[in-house]
Image: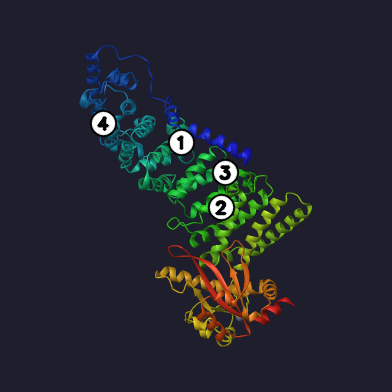
Amino acid sequence: MGSSKKKGQQRKAAAKKALSAATVERSVSGLSGDSGSNSNINGGNSNQSKIVAKVKRGNNYATKRLTSGVEEEGFSYEQSGVLSAVLGFLKRCEDETFDQVLSSVGGDLKSPSSWIYILSRGSYIEPSCKLQIAENIGPLVRCMSNDMERLLFKSNKHWREGIVPFVKLISNVMENEDNNSLEDEKIIKTLLQHDDLIRTVVQMGFWDVHRPDIVKELKYEGLVSTDIVRASGILIEMLINGMEGESRIRLLKNIGTTPIVNKEYDSSCMVSYTAELVRGLKTEDQRDVTFQILQLLMREADCIDKDVVTEMIKLGTNAAFTSDYEGAYYVTLLSLRCMYANATNNLSDTRVACTIRAGLIEMCLNFIEHYGEHEFFAGDDDESSSFYNIIGCILQGINNVSLHQKSAKAIRSIPVVNVSLRVARMLLQCQIKLREKTNINNNTKCKELLDMVSSALDINGSYCCRCNKSLSKTKVMQCNGCHRMSYCSRACQKEDWLNGGHKLACCKSYTDEKSGQFQGRIFPVAVPQNERAATKLEELETNLNMVQLKMFLYKSETILSQASSLNIPLYDCVAMFDLTNSLPTVGVVKYTSFYKKPEEKRGFEESRSKDNITCTFCTYFYGGESEDRVTVQRFFPHEWLSKQIK
Ligand SMILES: [Zn+2]
Ligand SMILES: [Zn+2]
């Protein structure tokens, strides 16, 4: 991708750097409370033990000294008992006031935030403290997470003062000690046992936009909400990086589905973290980081729901987004992911249908139209990750699943006239440009993609299996026996039953002896065990049956010319339609190369009708455990072919 890629990489590196833990230190230190004094705790051990004793009694001077980070060599928060004393104080933050706690020890400390700073400092200087801290800050986490009441030691002011040291504490406790990742993971898991922590960390990232009440309060303390917002992103990254395997996936899922606003504050805003990140893609600021987190959430934890898909496609069809190549590329890449089911990693009918309804096809057209001529559209060094290829994957996916029930319905709900007109206009432009020979490569690629759009729209539809008349939703007659054939009228149904051979095929499965008159599924012969999959397969066959005649007539010229070059009569031909390619293809062969077994060959010769040509239609079926192929056999009278040509 040349310079834009390089630019992207530079940006990525810069963003990574900006997200290092040091930034938390920077963005939350100096906000308030942390006095950062340089003075020393003078004197020897006796002096130190005096200070420790004073801290345990809630003495202001001694406590502030310790928070300023000038411990003597050999000082231990754990050994000295400071740690357990401070944790003991903070455990009372839900039920008692600060004054009550202080008066129980006769102290004069000004703010409980100093205790939080001591824990933060302790976990930084003495990593062995972390687990004990993580285990014992439940009450503190609950108080700080309650962003509706906002009380710490029953005081709103103390809560406000506590925010920055709290964020810093969580960050310090989570900070990786590279040498012991097991211990680190244990600490993070312990932290996450405090239920509200993830929700709070996520929602802090949106305080500036969604919580004017908190922003106002933070201002009292001279705090800027954007610093907290930034810290939220860093904490999330630390959390994710600190976990592995199953627990990491659970964590990602948890984060990705957390609503960005406390529902007690606004029950109407149920936007998930993932959906909100998608919205964030439209601004260039930190886009690479946003994209990477989205990839994690969507790929690893499958945080894909209707909202996420809708936001994604909304962005991709937004007019303002048509001049932003990089953004468009990211959206396309993530949209492709939205078409796949996480469990099987196969295309999912439900998901593809959801993306189509959200406007996936329109989005692809948008991007072909606006970026088809872009110098990197077809890729330079790596074509597989090119914009052209990603759009191609999406369109091929749509084509492969377009006859499944939900996707078929979704495609039929597209205002096809508008889209077809647009495709036709764009194809025309391509041809004009091709004649002018401007960038032939890009033009043929655009044309290829546009043909795929046309094909998805063309193939889809409901047509009478006998006469190819378009079926309205209300007037479809289905064969009561197999529920796989649809007709426009009783007359067509009767005609197909008596003369079309359906009587022989309905509800009966393929046998070698009947290979020349059997109309139905020949592969796979078995019906899936799973009832849901069996229903899905039946729906697929119904949709496939409705478009066969249309496809047959559409390809009549190709079939006739291939048959004549083989120099065999039409009744000796098998026209094999392959719908598993990016565009449907047809290939004509002599029946002897299609029916391999002698019994099959004999069966065909004995039972066929000389008036018909044999056709097979092969398509993918996504509904079972794996991606399967389904092949269905039909016969069509020759006269239909030649009538079509004229
Ligand atoms: Zn009909
Ligand atoms: Zn039937």
User: Spatial distance from mark 2 to mark 3, Cα to Cα?
Assistant: 12 Å
- Residue picked out by circle 2: 313
- Is there a contact, CB below 8 Å, between mark 2 and mark 3? no
Q: Which residue occupies the extreme bottom position in the image?
A: 498
Quarter residue 465 falls in? bottom right
Report helix, strand or loop for mark 2: helix
User: For the point 27% across and 11% down, which residue is it?
Assistant: 43
Disc 1 target residue? 229
Task: Choose the circle earlier in sequence order: 1 or 4.
Answer: 4
Looking at the image, is mark 2 or mark 1 earlier in the sequence? 1
Amino acid type, mark 1: Val
> Residue at 39% of width from left, 40% of height from top?
200
Where in the figure is residue 41, as x and y percent of width and height? 30, 15
Secondary structure at badge 1 equals helix
Q: Which residue is mark 3?
A: 282
Q: Earlier in the sequence, mark 2 or mark 3?
A: 3
Q: Nearer the viewer, residue 96 or 498?
A: 498
Say how many tags the image has.
4
Residue marked by disc 4? 87
Q: Residues within 10 Å of mark 4 (few under 14, many from 20)?
A: many
Q: Which class describes the residues within 10 Å of circle 2: few (<14), some (14-19), or many (20+)? A: many
